[in-house]
């Protein structure tokens, strides 16, 4: 039986902002907040490979809670990785430290698609267990579930690992569009079901990460990526959880990313929130968008930029403060705590 998110989280500032409702203050969370920069994360993960750590519910629960305890953020982001559902269905891959996901048998032909069977909840019981544990622990604080978007997952699978230029990906997309769409259709089911499992276990919101979508032209995104992301986001359309859609370098794609089926569009640090709101109109809340590198700047510089982003966010129908990409591993965690406190202080509506 599905476990709905606690009713109290519907009144949280994060969920209310995502729904473009009034808030008591601008909610804050940070992409990649669950770990990376925290010494307590490194301690609990010591000697445990990344994928294994994502499949141990008690460890997932502890890591997800760490930044909530330390920073006082307004939401927890489920600790996992976008390739976890691929690993769960049997794809031979690993997350190599310092490299990223590496795929043993890249997808280059129709025969290679047999690696991608439909994801079911039975493939990821550890996710259901961890989400349910977290919802009990978090109480009124919402949990955000997430998945990788079909285009980004396809890039890893076609390239065999991370790529700067996505040359094999684009060659396949243009050279064999039938195979490309067949690949992305399978990935849309996998990503959508991964989101659905988390939402049904009690997550209060979900985010679809399309990390590499910014490598595409607007026309290519609209034709070859957006329809599949729409399927993934549509998998939770009936579950009454706000959907956040984020990509890197996607300033030209913001409106399309909203149209794919999101209530909130994530904005990276390359586009001001003011411009993003103008491009998106009144239909979407926005999330973002402090440059992660500014966390290393002198406090007066950082404070000024945080205040500017909060003010820019007031022009949106809803605003969730976040970074314009992920927390860098070497950042001082105390700076993130201080940023959280500053956002709460300067945005208070009480």
Image (spheres, rainbow, N blue to C red):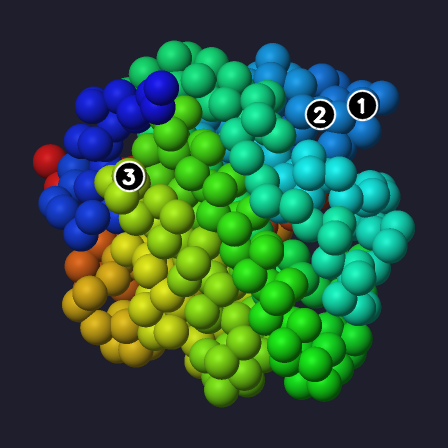
Choose top left, top right, bottom left or bottom right for residue 48.
Answer: top right
CB atoms of marks 2 and 3 within 8 Å: no
Q: Quadrant location of residue 163?
A: bottom right
Q: CA distance from mark 3 to mark 1?
A: 34 Å
User: Label 3 belongs to which residue?
Assistant: 239
Q: Are marks 1 and 2 in contact (CB under 8 Å)?
A: yes
* Residue at figure coordinates x 47%, y 62% from the top left: 229
Between residues 123 and 23, which one lies in front from this camera angle? 123
In the picture, the disc for residue 112 is none
Q: SS at mark 2?
A: helix
Is residue 180 left or right of 344 when viewed as pictured?
A: right
Residue 212 at what x, y percent from top left? 62, 66
Label 1, secondary structure: give it.
loop
Q: Would you place residue 12 above or below residue 147 in this image?
A: above
- The C terminus - image quarter: top left
Residue at the (83%, 51%) spot, across then down: 102
Determine the residue located farthest toward the right in the rendered image: 104
Estimate how packed mark 3 is, as few (under 14), some (14 to 19) or many (20 or more) residues with alpha carbons within 10 Å. Answer: some
Q: Which mark is residue 53?
A: 2
């Amino acid at each position: 039986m599905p476990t709905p998110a606690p009713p109290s989280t519907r009144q949280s500032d994060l969920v209310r902002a995502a729904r473009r409702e009034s808030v008591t203050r601008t909610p804050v969370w940070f992409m990649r907040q669950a770990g990376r920069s925290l010494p307590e994360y490194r301690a609990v993960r010591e000697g445990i490979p990344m994928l294994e750590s994502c499949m141990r519910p008690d460890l997932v629960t502890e890591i997800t809670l760490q930044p909530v305890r330390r920073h006082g953020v307004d939401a927890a982001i489920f600790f996992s990785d976008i390739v976890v559902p691929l690993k769960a269905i049997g794809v031979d891959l690993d997350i190599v430290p310092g490299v990223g996901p590496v795929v043993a048998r890249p997808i280059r032909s129709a025969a290679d698609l047999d690696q991608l069977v439909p994801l079911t909840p039975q493939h990821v019981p550890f996710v259901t267990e961890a989400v349910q544990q977290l919802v009990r622990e978090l109480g009124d604080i919402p949990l955000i579930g997430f998945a990788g978007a079909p285009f980004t997952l396809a890039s890893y699978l076609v390239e065999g690992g991370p790529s700067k230029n996505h040359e094999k990906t684009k060659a396949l997309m243009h050279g064999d569009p039938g195979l490309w769409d067949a690949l992305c259709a399978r990935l849309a089911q996998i990503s959508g079901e991964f989101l659905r499992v988390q939402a049904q276990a009690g997550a209060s919101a979900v985010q679809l990460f399309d990390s590499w979508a910014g490598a595409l032209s607007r026309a290519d995104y609209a034709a070859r990526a957006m329809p599949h992301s729409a399927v993934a986001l549509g998998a939770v359309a009936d579950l009454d959880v706000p959907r956040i859609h984020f990509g890197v370098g996607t300033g030209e794609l913001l409106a399309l990313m909203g149209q794919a089926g999101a209530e909130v569009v994530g904005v990276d640090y390359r586009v001001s929130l003011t411009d993003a709101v103008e491009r998106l109109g009144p239909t979407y809340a926005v999330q973002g968008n402090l440059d992660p590198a500014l966390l290393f700047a002198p406090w007066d510089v950082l404070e000024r930029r945080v205040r500017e982003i909060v003010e820019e966010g007031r022009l949106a129908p809803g605003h969730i403060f976040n970074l314009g990409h992920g927390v860098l591993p070497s950042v001082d965690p105390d700076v993130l705590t201080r940023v959280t406190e500053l956002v709460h202080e300067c945005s208070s509506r009480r």
